[in-house]
Each structure stands twice: as C-alpha cells, then as structure tokens.
C-alpha cells in the first residue's frame, strides 16, 4: 500500500456526487415512520464484524463478504440494498468529521452538496475564517492552515468548532445524513484529536485556542448533533486510541471505534484495549457499541497474533465488533482482507460472561470456546473433540502461545 495513497474515506467519484445531488433533490429524506428501526444490536451472531470506512464497491462485489456494521461517508439506496441483500440486519452508518476537513475537492463537494440539500452552490460554504491556523513565522498573525501531522495528498485541516458558520455547515450535513432511510445512524471521524493549532483569525484579530476550548467546542457540536439524530439511530465516533476517563464526549454517543487497536499508532496492549472497551460500555448511551479496529500498520503484512487477539477480544462482550484492514492510510478493503475461516465461523450464543483463565481470558459458547493468552502460554483441556481454527489441529488438549488467541469449534459427532 502506498503511503501517498489518499484515504478511501475521502476518495469519492464525481459520479457519486451527481447521483447524490439527484437523490437529495428528489426527496430521499425519510419520513418519521420510515426511520423507526430498532436501536438494538443485531441478532446474536458470532462474531460481530465491522468495516471501517468501507470501500463500498469492493464490499458489494465480493461474493462472501458480509458485515454487521458498515461505516462510510454516504450510502445510496441501491448500495444499501445490495449490502443488506447479503446480510439483512447490517447496520449502515454515514458521516465525515465534526472538526476536520480534507483538501480533496471532491470530498469538499460532497460535504457542501449534502449540507445544502443537493445544491453545491447553496448558502452553506467553506470559508477561510473557519480554519484553525498557526503562526509559522512568529509575527503574531495566524496565517497558515493547521494540518494534521504526517497527512499529505490530501491534507487534513483542523476547523474551528467555535465558528458559527462551520457549525451550521457541518451540522446540516449530519442532519441530512441522519434523516436518510438507508442510514441507521452516523459516524464521526477523528474526534478529540490533540489541539496543536494556535487558534483562528476573526476580522483580523487572533482568537487563541487552548485545550479546553478545543474540547468544549467539539462537545457543543456533539450536543447539537445528538438533538438532531433520531433516537432510534446510532451515533458512533472514532475515538482513536480511546477517550480519557473524564472525557465529556461518550454521553452523546452510542459507542466508538478504537482505531488501530494493538497497533503501533496507539501502542495499546490487550489490557489497555479491554479497559477502553469497558469504559465505552459504561459511559455511552445504549446500546453501547465498541469496535476494536486492528490493522497492519499500513504494511500490508498481517501480524497474526495481533489479528487473532483483537478478533477474540471482540468476542468477550456481546456488543463488541471486530474490524481489520491495512491501517490509518488505507481503510475499508475487503478483497485483500476477508478471512472466511475466521469471519464465517458460528460459535452460537455465549454460555455466560468471559472470565480470567490462567494468565489470560476465556469465554465458552454453544459451539466452541475462545482463549486469549497474556504474557504466558495457556493450556486448555476440553471434554470433547474440538477444531482449532487458528492451526487446523483437532483434539481435546491445546496450548495457546503467549500474546496470542485461539478459537476452538466443537466437532460434530
């Protein structure tokens, strides 16, 4: 995967924009009775699978790929029908970000077109004073847009969450997205990023930004957004490495994505990842969604121990999802990362909650067992013949290597 390849989340074709404009102009907004879907988790199914910033064409064209939770910028009605034809209970979430924009013109066209109800030339437009900026030469003037470190082609710029015009623009986008019949809720990318920008300029006067302003500005947007999204629809945010215990954001959310779980970007180990997941279950609104997103750190090379650990960890709770892709610069692929031997297993319903097991964790299901090993190997003795999905071995006695996880399916007699 090329480091300079733009994130799929921001690459939308002009064709999509044209179709989008037509769809909005011809009344794709759903009536209240049309958007009364249940807010409940999908029916019991093990595992629960998510795809983060989905490449929709790959997903639709891949014959076997089915996900419980699909997140992207927008779904056309026909796209949603094709995805749900494969998995009828799939939840589809649409959205961009409340406080960042891409320099990609097509990305900005999508934002402005939706926000103006289908008219790209409508009154809600991106203006220069909406951007947060920095003082590069120390002359006291905030004159350079504040770009997320390491992001080029396209660049990702921070927006001032206090700016009334920006609030109107981005909230209109989300209100219209949430009203679509084909969307089960909204996704907010890059929430709670580090406030490294100096501030913004207003009528030639610098308006400083500190950490408290950055957080309170985003909270204000979240509060307004929460009032706009129908109660039966989900609000999910990308929490990056996880929200702090005193973060004000979870109260407005049904859950969040832990992007790059177990990867180099966040440096999360199993215990910290589980702790952030538990925090989400305790601080968000029902139904308390958590997505453990594991990736290859953009190398394209799979760390199988990391993959299996994240996959098994998602099975410890009933409402936790697992996502896997290449990484921060290239999300949402299906063709290269669909693992039928894992993703298509059927463990059935859990027999009970997970529990500590030696120096790891275990959970038993109707049709199998999962074991996660911590800093030491874990031995497991079962009362009947099982298939170890991770190795292909069958038997009743197994050893799970340290910092790894194995999934065992009961052999039919």
Image (tube, grey):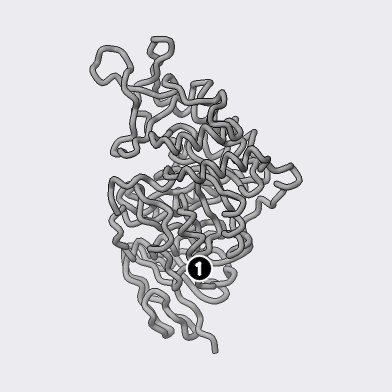
Q: Nearer the viewer, residue 196 or 377?
A: 196
| Residue found at x 45% / y 57% | 323
Q: Give the farthest residue toward the top.
A: 204
Give the quarter of the image for residue 350: bottom right
Q: Is residue 228 visible?
A: yes
Residue 305 horizontal/vertical position (percent): 33, 65
Instruction: Say what secondary structure mark 1 lies in.
Output: loop
Give the quarter of the image for residue 403: bottom left
- Judge from the rendering whether residue 183 lies leftward or rightward of residue 333; answer left or right: right
In the rendered image, which quarter contains the C terminus?
Answer: bottom right
* 156, above or below 373, in the image: above
| Residue found at x 29% / y 19% | 135
| Residue found at x 38% / y 63% | 336
- Judge from the rendering whether residue 109 lies leftward or rightward of residue 397; answer left or right: right
| Residue found at x 31% / y 53% | 297
Residue 155 horizontal/vertical position (percent): 34, 35
In the rendered image, which quarter contains the N terminus?
Answer: bottom left
Residue 316 horizontal/vertical position (percent): 50, 62
């Amino acid at each position: 995967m090329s480091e300079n390849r733009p994130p799929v989340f921001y690459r939308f074709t002009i064709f999509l924009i044209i179709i989008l404009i037509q769809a909005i102009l011809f009344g794709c907004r759903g009536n209240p009775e049309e958007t009364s879907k249940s807010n409940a988790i999908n029916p019991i199914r093990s595992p629960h699978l998510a795809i983060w910033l989905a490449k929709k064409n790959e997903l639709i064209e891949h014959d076997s790929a089915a996900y419980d939770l699909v997140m992207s910028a927008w779904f056309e009605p026909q796209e949603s029908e094709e995805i749900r034809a494969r998995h009828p209970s799939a939840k589809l979430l649409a959205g961009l970000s409340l406080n960042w924009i891409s320099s990609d013109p097509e990305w900005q066209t999508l934002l402005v077109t939706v926000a103006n109800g289908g008219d790209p030339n409508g009154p809600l437009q991106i203006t220069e004073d909406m951007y947060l900026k920095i003082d590069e030469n120390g002359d006291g003037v905030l004159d350079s847009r504040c770009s997320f470190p390491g992001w080029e082609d396209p660049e990702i710029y921070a927006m001032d969450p206090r700016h009334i015009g920006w609030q109107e623009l981005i909230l209109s986008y989300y209100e219209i997205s949430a009203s679509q019949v084909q969307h089960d809720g909204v996704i907010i990318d890059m929430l709670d990023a580090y406030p490294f920008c100096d501030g913004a300029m207003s009528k030639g006067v610098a308006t400083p930004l500190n950490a408290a302003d950055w957080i309170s500005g985003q909270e204000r947007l979240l509060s307004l957004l929460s009032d706009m999204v129908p109660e039966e629809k989900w609000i999910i945010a990308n929490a990056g490495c996880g929200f702090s215990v005193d973060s004000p954001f979870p109260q407005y959310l049904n859950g969040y994505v832990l992007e790059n779980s177990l990867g180099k970007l966040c440096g999360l180990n199993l215990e910290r990842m589980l702790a952030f997941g538990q925090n989400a279950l305790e601080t968000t609104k029902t139904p308390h969604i958590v997505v453990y997103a594991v990736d290859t750190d953009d190398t394209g090379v799979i760390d199988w121990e990391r993959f299996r650990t994240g996959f098994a960890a998602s099975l410890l709770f009933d409402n936790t999802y697992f996502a896997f892709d290449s990484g921060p610069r290239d999300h949402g692929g299906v063709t290269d990362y669909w693992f039928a031997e894992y993703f298509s297993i059927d463990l059935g319903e859990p027999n009970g909650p997970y529990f500590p097991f030696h120096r790891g964790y275990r959970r038993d299901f109707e049709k199998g067992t999962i074991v996660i090993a911590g800093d030491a190997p874990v031995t497991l003795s079962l009362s009947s013949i099982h298939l170890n999905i991770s190795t292909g071995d069958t038997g009743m006695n197994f050893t799970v290597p340290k910092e790894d996880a194995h999934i065992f399916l009961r052999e039919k007699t």
